[in-house]
Amino acid sequence: MSKRSLVVAAAIVVAFLGGYVVSNRQPAVEGQEEGAANAFAAVPDAVGSLDVTGPYEVVADWPQDISTLPGNEKWTWGAGQGVFAESPDRVLYIQRGQLPVLPQIKPVELDQIAPNLTYPVMGLLRNATGASPPGALEVNGKVGDDSDRGTNGVDFLWANCIVVIGRDGTIKETWTQWDRMLRRPHSIYISPYDAEKHIWLVDDYRHAIFKFTNDGKTLVQTIGEPNVHASDDKHFYRPTFMAFQPDGSMYVADGYANTRVVKLDKDGRFVKAWGQPGENGKETRPGYFNNVHGVAVDPATREVYVNDRNNRRIQVFDEDGNFLRMWTIAWDRANLHFVHIDAERKLWVYDQVAQTLARFTLDGRLMYAWGGLGAYPGALWGVHGISVDQEQNLYLAAVGRSGVQKFSPRAGANPEYLVGRHVYAAWQ
């Protein structure tokens, strides 16, 4: 073979091998450097990282334990329902009362129940959502008194349901003036399109939404009739979450019992509702729901994403409630607590079975997930509320482990794996 032929043949072989390698290599995740040792790590050049807390570091001892408040020494955090970071210096947190401080215990052998059985497992002493009030919604047709959760002041303490936390974890305010008005505070918000920064709180057992001045001193509006449930233009039936449009209109996920989304105008007046009860756990038809437990708005398209929780799917509608598309979580045990879309249009859900926070594309393709069950700092158990401040610190309120945790971005973290900031339009 001539020298020229050898050169041509070698070039063909090199080109073929190069094409094979390129076509079969794992594509880099958007935002990562080419050649990263692990294209799926939260920090691309990290060595030996298991990404237990994903692209974040948990902030130690944040917040201060509520038992450190004077006169509150016997009580700690209850089920953490919701969180909203107005700024790094002002984080709003809601909980279902407080629970007794538990003693530090060593694992106990429980052979009298079963051989080789010990408690606690993984350091988990108490499921806060099961221990926290309220109990039954109604008893014999009347509003329940929560006696099935024990005695107030002994088994739980209905106090400090709304707390304001500072940058360093200091508890700056406790809005105890509203404790008696609340029964099951479920989520809390400030609309990005409201220059006055009113605070919205959804209470699903009172079937109502409460709107406060930013300082929390004045209740300026109640939407729905407290303690009265229905499915009409004046009532809710266990509403759960809210989302806002640029014109100030809002959507209410309504909810645990009703199977609809309610649209309100910027003044809280009823505009319309959509949704019908489906076949629980098996529904595939558009516009049918079982447990409407989350709603979010795409800030670019104004499309409305609805968490059809019991059917493990996200349904997408236009701003007037017309069905557009949907996607389903393939794992039949998945149980999504919320759907959240940040200002960068990244979609986030929390699965309370796998105990993971996951990013999906807007059409349902998994990009990244992290989390792990346990009692260690940074472990996730029943995350129910999510928020991010202007410095991109992440806050997660949890009904299972109780309380709220703060996470700060790890140095060198892939920004695609960080939860983006909230939309800031009328304020920042």
Image (spheres, rainbow, N blue to C red):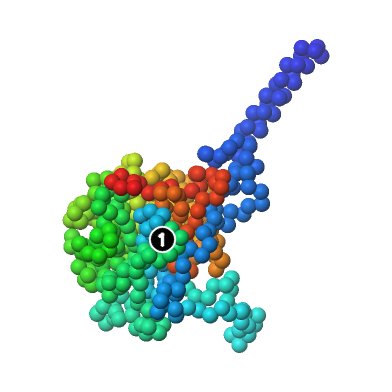
The answer to whether residue 179 is left or right of residue 375 is left
Residue found at the far front of this picture = 70
Count neighbours of disc 1 (C-alpha within 10 A) and say few if under 14, some if 14 to 19, many if 20 or more.
some
Q: In the picture shown, does residue 378 fall above or below 12?
A: below
The residue that mark 1 highlights is: 166
What amino acid is labelled 1 in the image? Answer: Gly
Q: Where on the picture, by quarter, is residue 318?
A: top left
Q: Secondary structure at mark 1?
A: loop
Residue found at the far bottom of this picture = 112
Residue 67 in view of the camera: yes
Q: Residue at x 80, y 12 (%)?
A: 3
The answer to whether residue 214 is left or right of residue 61 is left
Residue found at the far right of this picture = 1
Q: Position of residue 214 (x, y in %)?
A: 27, 58
Residue 285 in view of the camera: no
Q: Position of residue 280 (x, y in %)?
A: 37, 63
Q: Residue at x 38, y 69 (%)?
A: 95
**Viewer-nearest residue: 65 or 48:** 65
Image quarter in which the N terminus is found = top right
**Viewer-nearest residue: 214 or 323:** 214
**Viewer-nearest residue: 377 or 251:** 377
Q: Residue at x 28, y 61 (%)?
A: 215
Q: Residue at x 35, y 77 (%)?
A: 158
Q: Position of residue 307 (x, y in %)?
A: 37, 56
Q: In the picture shown, does residue 319 fall above or below 120?
A: above
